[in-house]
Image (tube, helix red, strand yellow):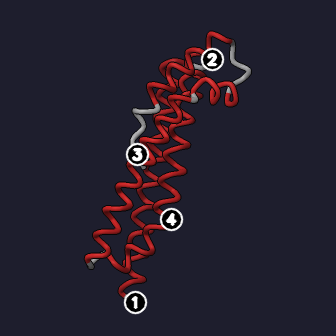
Amino acid sequence: MVVKRAVFKAALGLSMVSILSKLLGFAREQAIAWRFGAGAAVDTYVAALAIPTLISGVVGGALSTAFLPVYSEARSTKEGRQLAGIVSGVNALLGVLGSLAAFYFAPFLVRVLVGNFSPDQQALTVQLLRILSFGTPPP
């Protein structure tokens, strides 16, 4: 019963943080739209931010889904602490590798994501993606 309660608390905590994140993201998008309106510059920013956000979400979602149930049972043991350290290290490594891949493959990713942008807008999106790929925090 204690383990189920711990898993429930962890899941509830993650759900609350996820909801807060979505609300803050919505507020960010509203503030950008209010300040800059709808146009090529905002479209470029949103397109460039989509890839690092996707990488962060996939890595973080996969690791947390697999990690939480296992860790909740072993968190007070030496193995639990080792697991947390290993998962944190893997998470950081995958985040860095994802950022490097986004940086290196930025021109290709931008063509796939927003091939309908003008060449100038695509070039700006590539530049922004290369900057934002290292600015997105790991999951």
Position of 20 relative to 44 (above/below): below
Q: Earlier in the sequence, mark 4 or mark 3?
A: 4
Q: Position of residue 26 (x, y in %)?
A: 51, 39
| Amino acid type assigned to the residue bearing label 1 in the image | Met
Q: Earlier in the sequence, mark 2 or mark 3?
A: 2
Question: What is the distance, in whole Å, between disc 1 and disc 2 at their CAs?
Answer: 54 Å
Foreground: disc 1 or disc 3: 3
Report the disc number at residue 1.
1
Question: What is the distance, in whole Å, between disc 1 and disc 3 at their CAs?
Answer: 33 Å
- What residue sits right under mark 3 in the picture? 138
Q: Is residue 1 left or right of residue 55?
A: left
Badge 2: how crowded within 10 Å, few (<14), some, or many (20+)?
many
Position of 117 relative to 73 (above/below): above
* Callout 4 touching callout 1 (CB < 8 Å): no
Please tell me whether mark 4 sits on a helix, a strand or a loop.
helix
Foreground: disc 1 or disc 2: 2
Badge 1: how crowded within 10 Å, few (<14), some, or many (20+)?
few
User: Quadrant location of residue 115?
Assistant: top right
Question: Residue lying furthest bottom in this view?
Answer: 1
Q: Position of residue 18 (x, y in %)?
A: 46, 54
Which residue appears at 39% of the width and 41% of the height? 137
Report the disc number at residue 65.
4
- What residue sits right under mark 2 in the picture? 122
